[in-house]
């Protein structure tokens, strides 16, 4: 994985991810005992009008592109499908998880 000098916001992002993962895991463990499921979705960059301007920067686009083995950004409909799954009976046993929709980013 890149060091913090290659992308100055990476340490902040990593701390945020660790905190949200701990929250979901802990809440899932505690609330699962009373039938409440707690899960999260952890996407990579998703292609939206708000994210597109960031990819005008060749350095940023290259960094992100090099981190996603799938070779593309996520799509809004993919995130929506994950929400539907987690809200459905099909995921009834899932609690305390962060569903990674990152195109392989965390495989690095």
Image: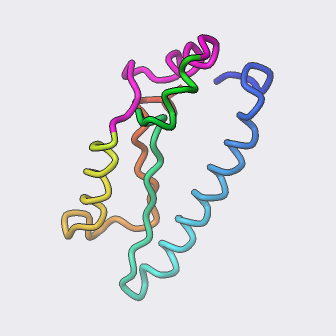
Image quadrant occupied by the C terminus? top right
Q: Is residue 103 above or below residue 90?
A: above
Q: Residue at x 43, y 84 (%)?
A: 33
Image x and y of residue 70, in percent: 37, 22
Q: Is residue 58 a member of the stretch shown in magenta?
A: yes
Q: Is residue 95 above or below residue 51?
A: below
Q: Is residue 86 above or below residue 82?
A: below
Picture mark count: 0
Judging depth in this view, the residue of 97 and 101 nearest the camera is: 101
**For residue 18, side relative to residue 85 (left or right):** right
Judging depth in this view, the residue of 94 and 60 nearest the camera is: 60
Q: Residue at x 53, y 65 (%)?
A: 24
Image x and y of residue 90, in percent: 19, 64
Region of the chain picked out in magenta, as a range? 57-75
Question: Could you say which quadrant of the image residue 34 lies in?
Answer: bottom left
Judging depth in this view, the residue of 85 and 48 nearest the camera is: 48
Image x and y of residue 45, in percent: 48, 34
**For residue 72, side relative to residue 30 (left or right):** left
Judging depth in this view, the residue of 31 and 68 nearest the camera is: 68
Q: What sort of colour scheme is used for the picture?
A: rainbow
Residue at the left extreme, as displayed: 90
Question: Could you say which quadrant of the image residue 10 lies in?
Answer: top right
Image quadrant occupied by the N terminus? top right
Q: Residue at x 25, y 51 (%)?
A: 81
Q: Residue at x 68, y 42 (%)?
A: 13
Image x and y of residue 63, in percent: 59, 17
Residue at the bottom extreme, as displayed: 34
Q: Is residue 67 a member of the stretch shown in magenta?
A: yes
């Amino acid at each position: 994985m890149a060091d913090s000098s290659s992308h100055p916001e990476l340490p902040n992002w990593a701390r945020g991810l660790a905190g949200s993962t701990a929250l979901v895991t802990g809440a899932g463990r505690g609330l699962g005992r009373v039938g409440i499921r707690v899960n999260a979705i952890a996407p990579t960059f998703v292609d939206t009008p708000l994210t597109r301007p960031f990819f005008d920067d060749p350095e940023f686009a290259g960094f992100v592109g090099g981190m996603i083995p799938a070779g593309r950004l996520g799509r809004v409909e993919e995130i929506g499908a994950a929400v539907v799954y987690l809200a459905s009976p099909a995921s009834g046993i899932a609690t305390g998880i962060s569903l990674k929709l990152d195109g392989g980013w965390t495989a690095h």
